[in-house]
Amino acid sequence: MIDILLSTEPLDVSHCINLVQSPECGGIDVFIGTVRSQTKGKQVVRLEFEAYERMAIKEMRKIAEQAMDKWPVHKIAVHHRTGVLQIGEVPVMIAVSAAHRDAAFDACRYIIDTLKQTVPIWKKEVFEDGEVWVAAHP
């Protein structure tokens, strides 16, 4: 089972974890990305995320499918938010369940690392003294 979500609404951490729970699985690995208050010593005011929605969803599903092919995982949820996010809010969440923890850890790391490299989601960091687009992908 793979659950992909790209939403302007706040992400629900408990719901995401519940999606991947299974009696067959002894481990769930969860990555929760949050908006931090500083980047490279500069005070962050907010982040703004934009996405090429259809392509982003397709690419997130492809990454999850690759993880299921590489590791013996049972369920994967990949949720990402777009729009304006304040300090402390959650822009990305990944949950992976597997019979054993190593597979869940490895698949979760692969998903977040690959997502940041290939999914067409763009992040603008807004500072007290300006702004910059980062993590722009093809």
Image: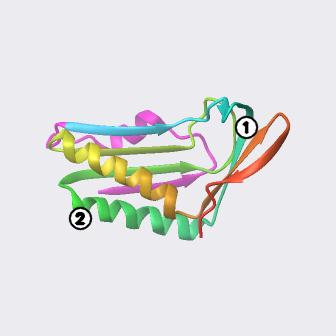
Q: Position of residue 74 (x, y in %)?
A: 22, 52
Label total for image: 2
Secondary structure of the residue carrying numbered label 1: strand
Q: In the drawing, what numbered circle is on residue 46? A: 1
Quadrant in which residue 42 is drawn: top right
**Above or below for 99 versus 65:** above
Taking the image as shown, residue 19 lies to the left or right of residue 124, namely left
Label 2: which residue? 69
User: Percent position (x, y) of residue 45?
Assistant: 76, 33
Q: Within the image, what quadrant is residue 35 found in?
A: top right
Image quadrant where one finds the N terminus: bottom left
Rendered image: mark on residue 56: none
Residue in the image at 53% along x and 50% along y:
80
The residue located at (83%, 33%) in the rendering is 128
Q: Residues within 10 Å of mark 2 (few under 14, many from 20)?
A: few
Question: Where in the figure is residue 81, as x and y percent of width and height?
Answer: 58, 48
For badge 2, the amino acid type reads Asp
**Mark 2 or mark 1, which has the lower sequence index?**
1
Measured along the vertical axis of the image, is residue 132 above or below residue 27? below
Comparing 75 with 125, the one in front is 125
Q: Is residue 97 left or right of residue 82?
A: left
Residue 27 lies in what quarter of the image? Answer: top left
The span shown in magenta is 1-26
Q: How is the image coloured?
A: rainbow
Q: Which residue is situated farthest in the right direction here?
A: 129
The amino acid type, in three-letter code, at marker 1 is Arg
In the image, is residue 33 above or below residue 133? Answer: above
CB-based contact (under 8 Å), mark 2 and mark 1: no
| Residue at (29% x, 51% y) in the render | 107
Q: Secondary structure at mark 2?
A: helix
